[in-house]
Amino acid sequence: MTDDERLDLAFLALADPVRRRIIARLSRGQATVNELAEPFAITKQAVSKHIQVLEQAGLVTRTRDAQRRPVHLNPARLEALTAWIDQYRLVREEQFRGLDAVLSTQAAARGPQAKDSS
Amino acid sequence: MSNALNLLVPEGLPFIDLDREFDHPVAEVFHAHKDPDLVAQWLGPRRLRLGVEQYDFRTGGSYRYTHTGPDGVDHVFSGVFHTVRENDFAIQTFEYDGYPDVVSIEFLTFQDLGGGRTRLSAHAVYPTMEARDGMVQSGMEGGLSEAYEQLEELLARAKV
């Protein structure tokens, strides 16, 4: 499969709102099929089918540890696409990383045991 | 070390909850919220210019800032600080001029974890589900443009 074909598959997979919500949920951490099915008024089998589509598109992977088989995002492949879907989270994360940087700069400016607290 | 952002966007309820820890004392995290010069350094998405026109982080104070996008278009955000308690708690409103009359109320808690660490928690309440989802999906212009750039980069790589 070429990269173009893979990208087509990815976008096709994301054309479905249920699958976009599954991806958004997985961007917060791995989950089992049961956990992923919870918010939806559709059968677990239907959710499994959606996960298969995402898996074929390379967007998610499933580990085979015992019966749990949690579903993971494939972050390397999908960074840009998840960014697109989960912008809010990314904006906040970027803000907070900015806040980390500001705090570190401030702490450094004060120095180890600062002489004054201006 | 990078601290995880915990984000909860519940189904069917017009709330957003988030929390994030910082490896700095609560007084410093609070100060970075109070000092307009510092706020300007972290609040805006990196690629956008952020102009802070008004910022008074005190009970009864208000704020107004403008993000200028890569396309030169201004996006104005404003609100009031309903309650601000030093190193502890704040309530603020949030309104985006591109989505007028839709105001969210944000409750911020600064929690001292000891050992020079702080947990910042936010609970945001929206007037409707549509308002919340609109905010999550499109309210953040910076995230969108940045994401599109990343998407373009991905597409460019795929062509090679």
Image (tube, coloured by chain):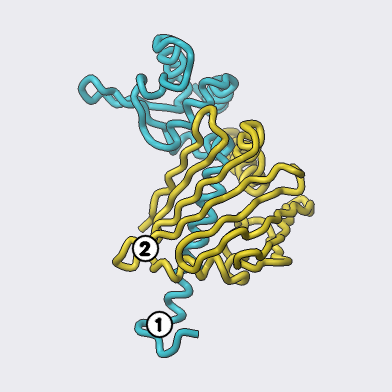
Chain colours: A cyan, B yellow
Q: Residue at the far right: name it.
A: B73
Q: Element type at marker 1?
A: loop
- The disc at residue A92 is none
Name the mark nearer the viewer: 1 or 2.
2
User: Is residue B6 toward the left or the right of residue B100 in the image?
Assistant: left
Kindly identify the amino acid type of the residue bearing the numbered disc 2. Asp
- Report the residue at 71% width, 60% height from top: B64
Name the subunit of mark 1.
A
Q: Is residue B155 above or below residue A50?
A: below
Q: Badge 2: few (under 14), some or many (20 or more) residues near its Cα, within 10 Å?
A: some
Q: Are marks 1 and 2 on the same chain?
A: no
Mark 1 → mark 2, Cα distance in angstroms: 22 Å
| Residue A7 point in image, percent of width and height | 55, 27
Q: Nearer the viewer, residue A4 or B51?
A: B51
- The disc at residue B112 is 2
User: Is residue B53 toward the left or the right of residue A21 in the image?
Assistant: right
Which corner quadrant of the image does residue A38 belong to? top left
Quadrant into which the C terminus of chain B falls:
top right
Kindly identify the amino acid type of the residue bearing the numbered disc 1. Gly
| Residue B34 point in image, percent of width and height | 56, 68
Pointer 1: what residue?
A111
Q: Nearer the viewer, residue A35 or B1?
A: A35
- Report the residue at 45% width, 31% height from top: A25
Q: Is residue A35 above or below residue A79?
A: above
- Report the residue at 68% width, 45% height from top: B103
Q: Is residue B157 visible?
A: no
